[in-house]
Amino acid sequence: MKRPSVNVRSYEYRSKRRHETPKKDQRRPFEVDRDRIQYSSAFHRLAGVTQIVRAGESGVFHTRQQHTYKVAQIGRRLAQYCQSTDEKLAKKLGLDPEVVEAACLAHDLGHPPFGHAGEHTLNKLVEDKGDADGFEGNAQTFRIITKLAVRFPLIDGLDLSRVTLAGCLKYPWLRNKKVVSRTDKWGAYQLDREDFEFAREYLPDDKQTLEAALMDWADDIAYSVHDLEDFHRVGAIPWASIFSAEGKSSIVQNTLEKWFAPPKNAQKILEKAFDKLLVGTVQPVFGPLLEVQYDGTRDQRFTLRNLTSFLIGRFIQATKLTEEGISVELPIQAEVRLLKQIAKQFIISSPSLAAQQHGQTQIITDVFDALFDNSGNTYPKFLPIKLRYIWNLSAGQKARFAADCIASMTESEVVGLHQRLTGASAGSVMDPIIR
């Protein structure tokens, strides 16, 4: 059957809401979307969720919420830059910075306690209980904005406009283990298929919308720059080793291995990008900052801010608007991949972080098992009141219910609940833990 002809760039298509909650004030529909996301409990929770280092460990490190604010700022600037460089095309495509910022604010709502360690643990636990949909942070984000977020008395989720929903889908497909690209990353669960189909109606399969592409690129930029900045401050980046021949070879090879479907000449692209950005620009210009211990002097802070600003500006200005979305030259993409790899190689792979994540995995597992094993025809008696409404949204799927509950907690909340359930701490009966 042939699809009807629909202009997916039209205001009518983009602004439509599935439940058509009424507009009652001066804001445009996309401004409403942005505000609903920022003022949601799910967004507030991100202040207590890991970016890389455990939330609350030190004021130096980004929380997931601080990271999200920076992604949103970069996303808005990207959209504005694209508008300024090609006003005619931007207008034709319907590009609106408000939508991009909204998608950026939403992009990490689904990250569970303890970041990727929690995500991988929940995925295994849900799969082991027979739910092939597993757990994925991006799919959980979509579930939050369409189902779990509380905003209206009779409607689930935030009832965002179609363009914003689609903009939140970094991976615009459901999970399919028969397809390699749909096995490890996916955008929605089968349980949320109707909302997914509403968001993607009439859009080409597997292709990000313009807003989703800008959100995705903004996330990469923020990750590559700001996390590196954090770890430089605490002296965890061995710059002398990185600038050595051995360091370059190691970083390039490890980046290449993690580049999904790389171009044929990916290694040469990475080597040239390393030489141009790190050896040709960062080392000679910012070398005095990188070669000494960071003590937080005024000059060091000034220089570090300049480095951050330089990198973000470089990556934003390399972005071009096209009829198909956005275009970023491969050498620039390679630079961002290299910076991300440095953080992964020297921080995420460290033994101290691995030991911490081992304990976090055990906490997630214990709480998941307690929730699953004590659910029958209803939720467990010990479940905090704030989370009880989730039972009615799980369609009787206990594993999904347990994962939804855990992904709705901050790290301190899941640790507190774990201590109560295991007897590690009796706590106070006057303290509900989760409010």
Image (cartoon, grey):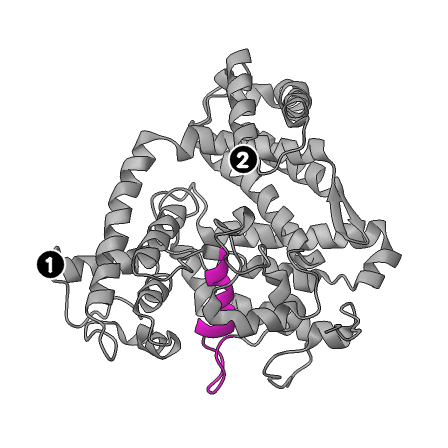
Can residue 389 be spotted in the picture? Answer: yes
Can residue 296 be spotted in the picture? Answer: no
Q: CA distance from mark 2 to mark 1?
A: 40 Å
Q: Residue at x 64, y 31 (%)?
A: 335
Give yes or no for residue 145 being in the magenta stretch. yes
Q: Residue at x 37, y 54 (%)?
A: 123
Disc 2 residue crowd, few under 14, some 14–19, many 20+, Cα 10 Å? many
Q: Which residues are magenta?
A: 138-157
Question: Residue 229: image x %, image y %?
Answer: 52, 35
Left-right relation of 330 to 379: right
Left-right relation of 412 to 322: left
In-front residue for pair 208/46: 208
Secondary structure under the numbered disc 1 in the rendered image: loop
Question: Residue 259: image x %, image y %?
Answer: 57, 35
Q: Which mark is residue 340?
A: 2
Which residue, as the protein is rendered here, is positioned at the far right? Answer: 88
Q: Residue at x 50, y 57 (%)?
A: 175
Q: Residue at x 24, y 80 (%)?
A: 377
Give yes or no for residue 391 being in the magenta stretch. no
Instruction: Say which label, 2 or 1, has the lower sequence index.
Output: 2
Quadrant of the rendered image containing residue 113:
bottom left
In the rendered image, the vertical position of residue 379 relative to residue 251, given as above or below? below
In the rendered image, the vertical position of residue 96 relative to residue 115, given as above or below? below
Secondary structure under the numbered disc 2 in the rendered image: helix
In-front residue for pair 379/276: 379
Q: Amino acid at mark 1?
A: Gly
| Quadrant of the rendering where the C terminus is positioned | bottom left
Disc 1 residue crowd, few under 14, some 14–19, many 20+, Cα 10 Å? few
Question: Residue 43: image x %, image y %?
Answer: 47, 63
In the rendered image, the vertical position of residue 427 relative to residue 297, given as above or below? below
* Residue wearing tag 1: 423
Q: Amino acid at mark 2?
A: Lys
